[in-house]
Every structure is written in structure tokens, then in C-alpha cells.
């Protein structure tokens, strides 16, 4: 994860990796960021005084979540998202889903039923019903979403893995990202 300093010496995350100026890279995990802040590694890297906001780890987590949800919204607008329990289940049966996204506060029964049909699809349970609904531009609750194989699914998974890795201190090589794993980390 890249960080830059502004003209005022304030440290900021560069989620796109395209902000101007010299950058400092830190492993995308909360523990690595906390260690870099504690050891004043950014000031040494930039060879200049750096002011790190006290809530920087929280800002990074929020920013990573926004990137993942934005990728989900783009997938919907591209026509690569399947919404609703029955439509997702039908797409899973046809093996037309690369990523199954369940709201972490959704019903356990629905998650269990779709999980059985998921097959090789990666399962993600990082977001609430409200977060999913907002990202998808829906007034109705979005509890289950399927992403068809392709660029949209790849983009969403990349961002979801970064968020999960940050929350779980760098562990991103998981098949299923679940609420239980995130909440206990």
C-alpha cells in the first residue's frame, strides 16, 4: 500500500497509486501500518517530518472498503452482477458465478443454501446489507449478490482481498472471506 505526504507534511494513503510525489510502501495490513507509525518509518523514508493523523488506520480501512464497494457498483452497471437469492442460486447452478457475496448480517439459512451451491465461486461476507444496497444503488435490501466471471469479478476480488488482508493483518490467500473471520481478527 502506497502512502504520500502532502505539502503540509500530512501523511495520506494513495489508494490509486497515482498521486504525485515520492511514495512510501507498507505491507497492506493494519499491524504493518501500526508498526511503521510507531517506529516513525515514514519520516525516515521521506527524509522529512511527517504528521500522521491519529485515525490513519481507520481511514485506510474505510478507503479500502469504498474501493471494493465501488468495484461492486461498477460490476452492476456493467451487467455483471446477479441480485437476489433466487437469481443468484440459478446462476450458481449454471456455474455462471465467480464470486458469491453475502451480506454479513444476512440470514444464516440463505448463506448456507447458497454456500452449498457455490462450488468453486469465492464467497465474500465483508459488508452489511446497507453497504451492499448503497453500492448497488438499490432501495431494496441487497443480501445476496453474484458476480459473473470476468474483469468485474477480478477487480472486486482484488479490492476485497486488500480489505480483508488489512483487517486480518495481511492474510489474503483465503478462499472464503467471512464475517466471522473479520470480526475475530
Image (cartoon, helix red, strand yellow):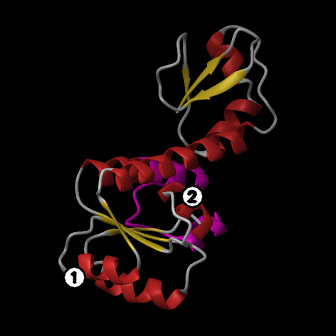
Indicate yes or no whether the magenta region holds residue 166: yes
| Mark 2 closeness class: few <14, some 14–19, many ≥20 residues within 10 Å | some
Residue 75 placement (x, y as % from top left): 35, 52
In what quadrant of the picture does the C terminus appear? bottom right
Name which residue lies at 53% across and 37% down: 27
Looking at the rendered structure, the secondary structure element under dot 1 is: helix
Dividing the picture into quarters, in which one does residue 149 lie? bottom left
Q: Is any part of residue 170 visible from this angle?
A: no
Q: Nearer the viewer, residue 45 or 94?
A: 94
Looking at the rendered structure, the secondary structure element under dot 2 is: helix
Relative horizontal placement of residue 151, taking residue 139 as reference (left or right): left
Indicate yes or no whether the magenta region holds residue 183: yes
Give above or below for 44 relative to 183: above
Q: In this rendering, which labeled residue sits more in front, label 2 or label 1?
A: 2
Name which residue lies at 56% across and 79% down: 106
Q: Pick out the residue farthest to the front.
A: 139
Instruction: Find out whether the residues at labels 2 and 1 contact each other: C-beta distance under 8 Å.
Output: no
Dividing the picture into quarters, in which one does residue 5 lie? top right
Residue 167 placement (x, y as % from top left): 60, 54
Relative horizontal placement of residue 82, taking residue 39 as reference (left or right): left
Amino acid at each position: 500500500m502506497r502512502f504520500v505526504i502532502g505539502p503540509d507534511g500530512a501523511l495520506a494513503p494513495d489508494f490509486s497509486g497515482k498521486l504525485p510525489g515520492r511514495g512510501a510502501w507498507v505491507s497492506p495490513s493494519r499491524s504493518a501500518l501500526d508498526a511503521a507509525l510507531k517506529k516513525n518509518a515514514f519520516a525516515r523514508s521521506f527524509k522529512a517530518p511527517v504528521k500522521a493523523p491519529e485515525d490513519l488506520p481507520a481511514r485506510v480501512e474505510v478507503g479500502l472498503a469504498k474501493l471494493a464497494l465501488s468495484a461492486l457498483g461498477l460490476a452492476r452497471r456493467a451487467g455483471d452482477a446477479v441480485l437476489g437469492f433466487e437469481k443468484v442460486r440459478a446462476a450458481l447452478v449454471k456455474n455462471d458465478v465467480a464470486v458469491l457475496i453475502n451480506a454479513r448480517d444476512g440470514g444464516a439459512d440463505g448463506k448456507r443454501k447458497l454456500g452449498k451451491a457455490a462450488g468453486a465461486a469465492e464467497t465474500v461476507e465483508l459488508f452489511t446489507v446497507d453497504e451492499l444496497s448503497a453500492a448497488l444503488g438499490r432501495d431494496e435490501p441487497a443480501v445476496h449478490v453474484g458476480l459473473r466471471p470476468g474483469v468485474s469479478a477480478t477487480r472486486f476480488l482484488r479490492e476485497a482481498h486488500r480489505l480483508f488482508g488489512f483487517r486480518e493483518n495481511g492474510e489474503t490467500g483465503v478462499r472464503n472471506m467471512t464475517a466471522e473471520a473479520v470480526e475475530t481478527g
